[in-house]
Image: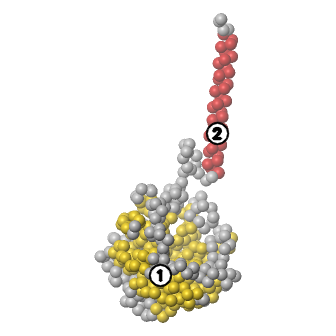
Amino acid sequence: MKVPAAAHWKRWLLCGALLALLVTYAAIRRSAGSRAWARAGGAAGPAGQSPARRPLGLDYFTKRQIGRPPEGLPCITDLLIVDLDGSGLKGVLVADGRLNKVTWIRQVRLGVFEEQDIGQPVAGPAHLEVADLNGTGHLDVLVASMGVIPPNNQKVGAVVVLENDGTNHFTNRVLLDHVAHVTYVAAAPLTKSGRLDLVVGEFGYFEGEIRWMENLGNWNFKSHPLLDLPGTIHAPVADLLGNGNLDIVALVSKKSEDVHVFWGDGHGRFRDQVLYGSTNMDFGMSGLCIGDVNRDGRPDIVYTCGDGFNYFTPGSRPWHGVQWLENLGTGKFAYHRVGDFPGAFSPVVVDLNGDGIPDIVACSGFNDWNNPDAASLMCFENDGAGHFTPRILAHDPTHLIVVKAADMFNDGRIELVTGAFFLFLPYNHISRVTLWEPRK
């Protein structure tokens, strides 16, 4: 039967109306998606893609000074980001080598910081850690005391604990003294006693050593020597083999330029092995940290060379940079050069841009500060396949020898905190403690 022409028109109008509704619905969905991404702080992209991230570079961070303003030439030797009072807000512990003090830049409310001294003065504070050493439930502050900065051969080093009574009052207690300049201390359960023992590194000068101090209880410790060499900078603890026993990784840079591992058996016995050594006696090892760089579940070792303190002519050298010792398991490691960075110090393994892949951040204490293009803060962006792209984060402030990373504001983003140490000219772009916040 022949369909009337009017029926054809009705069908066409109906199809057109349905098509218009579908197009309108799709447009509304796209618009709603765009608004949702905007509220989340990102830009809308194709289906299945994450919001666009700000690229790592000079515009990634804003910076501001926190704590007390600089007086004279600051000599900040170490920083530690920690929620010291259990308030839920992280603050910054500061080792001030110029003032011979340990201070606490406390986050009194979100984004607001106030600095206060804690404990009594400590001569030449060089390194800070926290641990509940006496089982009270409060974090005590461990301080490696050099006695005087820079080092000499006097036996003026000490290990000091600032004992926390839980009311933000700290009392100095000396656990070791009259030894070579102490540059590192950390607490860890090195035996099966259930108590926290100590690892101590004495940089010294002509003489120095690494020891571990067995916790006998009631603030009594017994020393056990591990290495009779000067030059220890860092000696963190990690279970490198995954066997439940803690090992000690030490960076030693004075008469040698070596990375040592002291393999632990869990009962206080250790076997020394040199994992990496440089034949360049001016290599200038300057810092070491532990982190899982390639996300294989095994702790790797990252270290910098950039120390310019002992050169006849202070400053950077062409071999300065960042290295990675990849943990292959069964006690074997593979060396990788991550990248060049004049005057490199204080490596940190951290996912800086939130892409799920750990990057490596470092600062510079001895770049060419007469050159305005010299980098003071860098990130080596990791692509997840073992390739690192250097990203300059800042040219100033200068003379930075310590950088730490943490989510300071509990918002899922990583902030950095840096400390400056002014020893050699030029004294430009002076800072003391700087907070670096990702731009919104």
Look at the numbered disc 1 and give the secondary structure of its residue: loop
Mark number for residue 29?
Answer: 2
In the image, is 165 to the left or to the right of 401? right
The numbered disc on residue 268 is: 1
**Crowd around label 1: few <14 · some 14–19 · many ≥20 (10 Å):** some
Q: Residue furthest left?
A: 279
Name the spot of residue 274 as percent of width and height, x first. 36, 76
Q: Which of marks 2 and 1 is in front?
A: 1
Q: Which quadrant of the structure image shows residue 409? A: bottom right
Disc 2 packing (10 Å; few <14; some 14–19; many ≥20) = few
In screen coordinates, is 320 left or right of 85? left
List x then y, in percent, for residue 178: 48, 94
Query: Mark 2 to mark 1: distance in Å?
Result: 63 Å
Give the residue at x 66% y 76%. 85
Amino acid on which disc 1 is placed? Gly
Q: Does residue 304 appear in the picture of this structure?
A: yes
**In this picture, is 10 found above or below 327?**
above
Q: Which amino acid does label 2 sit on?
A: Arg
Quarter-of-image position of residue 412: bottom right
Tell how many labels.
2
